[in-house]
Image: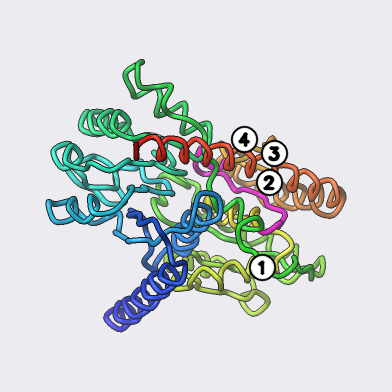
Amino acid sequence: MLFFQRVYNRIIVNIHKMKILTESKKNKADHIFTHVTYYSVGNAGDTVLSECVRKVFDKELYKISWGLTEVSKEVNIGLVKKINSTEALIIGGGGLFLPDTNPNNISGWQWACSNEMLSMINVPIIIYSVGYNYFKGQKPTQLFRENLAALIGKSIFIGLRNMGSVKAVQELLPEKLREKVIYQPCTTTLIRKIYADLPPKKKGNNVAFNIAFDRSERRYGSNKDVILSEISLSMEKLIKKGYNVYIIAHCTQDLNIVPYLKNRSNIKVINAASWLPDKLINFYNNMDVVIGMRGHAQMIPFGVNCNIISLGSHDKMKWFLEDINASDWYIDITNSPETLCDRIIEKFHEIHEVNGELTEKRLLDAQEKLYKITQENMQIIRSILEEHKK
């Protein structure tokens, strides 16, 4: 079964890559960029994010023909030559500053590029909408610190996707480099702005849950069974209130919530791990509220105007909400886990049932703020690129 799943995923990846390259050719672009990113299937949020980055550049900078490179691919001379044959290198977005998604002794973070290979890249480097995703208890190595400083020093633009990441990365850098690191919101929060053909938001008493299971011991600690049982109970209570409840798995391992369900027949369980961007975006466009644990199970719904409730097991969830002045949409799952069901229902009632119109206004105002920051940053990038050509 695993073999056939891998074959299927590879077919989907190839279809996705051909779609991207075909669209690039249609652009009749005068500019060719390299994009180091996750564009393969397996994590639906990263697949959407990758496309959103390119859409922002195509819309706000100029039409671009894109060359794609998987961020997990080790950098060698051949890849450096390929990068140098284009006009610029875009790295991101995503939580790339993390040691254990693509563990390596080359860079200490997800892109395995040594300082030697980095020094050979002679086109402008843009770090875009990247996050510092270390979990509690994980400490940056000296290798990562050194590679990070070299990368920041060489890059022309460094935009991290939340202020928490900005501050965390600045603390790891020599003082002379810190001011180069600025805030660039995750492009998935701008979906309504950059997908011109996205249908209007639909409403229909639909609520989606996303529960993450990567690094379970760091997310849940010793209270895993209590936390997951409480989340399951909250689903049942929402069903009794008349809502249609969905579980959306961005990665196949997210389906590990299923054994905790009290009544499986009342809940539609969906594995979106191999979905391409349009399908996931359209799914969320039909949801009223998304209660999520993965970052992109919050930022993508936010980008299509869903009410969101963040189940916090990682600082990045809190950082995103702090940036949009919505910390009250956050629930800490590790604090009094035996009360989690009640807190989810209370929060749902507060932000959706009682203050739905106010929540929608806050969301739209926050989107405008993030889009304005993005447009201003793109003007900075444009100016630097134009200066580089002279």
In the rendered image, residue 217, in percent from the top left (x then y), is placed at 40, 48
Nearer the observer: mark 3 or 1; the answer is 1
Nearer to the camera, 153 or 354: 153
Look at the numbered discs 1 and 4 and tell me whether their residues touch, using CB distance below 8 Å.
no
Is residue 309 magenta-colored? yes
Q: Of the residues shown, which amino acid type is indicated by label 3?
A: Ala
Q: Which residues are magenta?
A: 304-318
Q: Is residue 262 left or right of residue 119?
A: right
- Kind of residue at disc 4: Asp
Quarter of the image for residue 241 reads bottom right
Rendered image: mark on residue 326: 3
Q: Are marks 3 and 1 in contact (CB under 8 Å)?
A: no
Among the two numbered marks 2 and 4 on one chain, the one whose residue lies closer to the N terminus = 4
Q: Secondary structure at mark 2?
A: helix
Q: Which residue does the image show at 29% across and 53% down from the upper left? A: 86
Q: Which residue is mark 2?
A: 367
Q: CA distance from mark 3 to mark 1?
A: 25 Å
Q: Secondary structure at mark 3?
A: loop
Query: What SS does tag 4 mark?
Result: helix
